[in-house]
Image (spheres, rainbow, N blue to C red):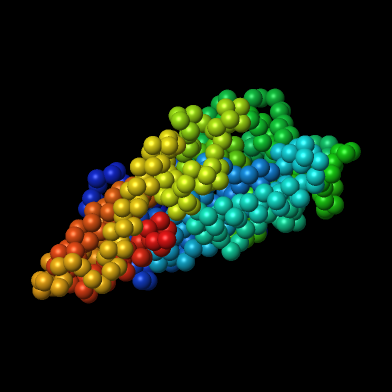
Amino acid sequence: MVSGQMTLRRHTHTPGGGSSWPVSGGIPGRGVHMLYLFNTMSGRKELFEPREQGIVRMFSCGPSIYRQPHVGNYRSFLWQDLLQRYLEYLGYRVERVLNLTDVEDKAIEEAEKEGIGVLELTERVSRKFFEDARLLRIKLPEKIPRSSTSVDQAVRLIEILMEKGYAYRHGQDIFFDPLKFEGFGKLFKLDMSRWPRGKRRFRRDTYVGRRWNLGDFILWHGFREGDKLTWDTAIGRGRPSWNIQDPAMITETLGYAIDISCGGVDNLHRHHDYNIAVIEAISGMEFSRFWIHGEHLLVAGKKMSKSLGNILYPSDFLKDGYDGRRLRFYLLYGHHRKRLNVVPSRVAQASEKLDALAELALQIASNESRAERVAPVQNDGFGLAAELTRRFKEHMDDDLDVRGAFDAVFETVKKTAGLHAQGRLDDGERRKVLKGLQEIDSVLQVIFK
């Protein structure tokens, strides 16, 4: 158990603030940087500074593997992958955890419908997730815990919460009382004046819609006759609820204090505030310095749903002739905090733009140019490599502005390819531009095949 209080520095800025921005400390390999990220907790862009210099501890809310993830889910995993890659580009060592939720009400219900075991179902879905992640060039973390492998830690956390008076037993179940935790709902900015006076308990793992359950939330599902997935533990026979599973996986792999917690906007309703309450009730200190949330993916202007029959999977794009690289680009070529609408014509336009940049990169990579045989090489291109890197970082440092970064890279690469074709680009500078472009693509993962 962790105790104590941590004092944190905060820096904020308004876009266009320019020289008024403070300067962050240097990172080996990249020097001084000024990465600003929008922090949901404060509602502002803040200068990113990890707790420990040079190391970033980051948690990504992974998929609930009772059903195959769709492209909306993958959009979330992609911008989180991009964030990790950009932090590494800046010189940080990123210790990231992405979890798989394989023990919850929905998984149990889905397995019953199919007439198979829960873990059989979730293992099948997890294999598909790993396959799609490779297709989309998502670099999965070394640590990918599962709910089913973190039961012992969940039990330990529940025992501590009961000892501290935050949790209590009701029948065979165990609940968390949010009124015992000062500041509950602070991420969502929940109006606690709406809280009912009478005792209310919510027993399900998750609830449909973006609603708030104004009452106590469940931590442990006590055994009931007919339950097929349970564990015998120090707190009785049963299974951990979804509300304790993430805290268990996080604290077991990253500890009680991290730098970044990521997820979709849906997690702002209940889930992430539940994580905060559970972890901070035990540790007594701030759990995550930054909270980053991505918006929904729409299809023809509507949210994906089974009832509308408009759920899209990566395989649907493959059938239409788009490979994983082009799909990755489309899902990233738009700000993660803004809704992205999937429209066939826009997917095609984005693919054409990506192909154009890839072709220009191939031209730069070629040692020959049409004009080199008839005109002397000049140094007109000197400084293009520095411009490429500067403009890329300028946009990425502004809350991961991928569109701005890509467009800026495109302009510089087009200029470079033009000079190269004319025989006016110094070969040393050409090589530097190509190296810079390869380093940039270590983040984007879309330019080179």
Classify 155 as above or below 177. below
Q: Nearer the viewer, residue 191 or 85?
A: 85
Give x and y (percent) for residue 425.
Answer: 17, 68
Classify 352 as above or below 152. above
- Image side of residue 41 versus residue 241, left or right: left
Judged from this view, the residue extending furthest toward the right is 225
- Image side of residue 97 versus residue 176, left or right: left
- Work out whether residue 285 can be spotted: no
Quadrant containing the C terminus in the rendered view: bottom left
Q: Quadrant location of residue 410?
A: bottom left
In the rendered picture of this protein, how many numbered marks are placed on residues?
A: 0
**Residue in the picture at 64% in, 37% down:** 178
- Image side of residue 27 versus residue 307, left or right: left
- Image side of residue 395 versus residue 134, left or right: left
**Residue in the picture at 85% in, 41% down:** 227
Q: Quadrant location of residue 409?
A: bottom left
Q: Nearer the viewer, residue 422 or 151?
A: 422
Q: Nearer the viewer, residue 386 or 207?
A: 386
Give x and y (percent) for residue 112.
Answer: 79, 39
Q: Nearer the viewer, residue 338 or 221?
A: 338
Q: Quadrant location of residue 271?
A: top right
**Residue in the picture at 49% in, 63% down:** 94
**Residue in the picture at 54% in, 57% down:** 134
Give x and y (percent) for residue 358.
Answer: 34, 57
Give x and y (percent) for residue 264.
Answer: 52, 42
- Work out whether residue 146 can be spotted: yes
Quadrant containing the N terminus in the rendered view: bottom right
